[in-house]
Image: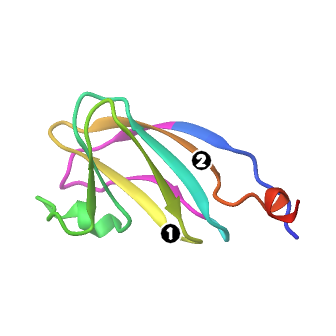
Amino acid sequence: MRNPTESKVNTVVVPPVGTDPSTLWIAADFPVRVVVRNVGGNILILAHDSSTLANFPPGNAGTFVLPAGDSEVFVLQPRQGIYASGSGGGGLASIAVSEALPQTWMES
């Protein structure tokens, strides 16, 4: 049995679409839940593959649009990432990360 991990929070500056996207989070060897809140003024475009966002303009396939002021919850599988680019002049994302299925909860 592995030790439970601490939840984490962070705020990330998100560059505009067509440049290298921000890495919001990459899961380790266990699933994690990531809450992404768009705290900037521009639309954020999210994807699980950074190359999807590096090509300008991104296609709709493989992307998720997060309007300003909105939040969404994603569950990442082990070693899966979530990346962000901003429409317009970039943006700002706040994230909260925790274990998707806490080990201690599963064993109780």
Label 2 vs label 1: CA separation? 13 Å
Q: Horizontally, is 18 left or right of 62 in the view?
A: left
Q: Which residue is located at x 18 percent, y 55 percent? A: 18
Q: Which residue is located at x 69 percent, y 44 percent? A: 7
> At which x and y percent is residue 84?
34, 51
Label located before the other in sequence (2 or 1): 1
Question: Is disc 2 surrounded by few (<14), some (14 to 19) or many (20+) residues within 10 Å?
Answer: many
- Check disc 1 and report the residue beneath it: 80
Q: How is the image coloured?
A: rainbow
Residue situated in front as seen by the camera: 14 or 106: 106
Q: Label 2: state its secondary structure.
A: strand
Q: Horizontally, is 36 left or right of 56 in the view?
A: right
**Residue 21 among those drawn in magenta:** yes
Q: Quadrant of residue 36?
A: top left
- Which mark is drawn over residue 97? 2
The span shown in magenta is 11-27
> At which x and y percent is residue 77?
55, 70
Number of marks present in the image shown: 2
Give the residue type at disc 2.
Val
> At which x and y percent is residue 39?
37, 29
Q: Which residue is located at x 14 percent, y 65 percent? A: 59
Image quadrant holding the N terminus, namely bottom right
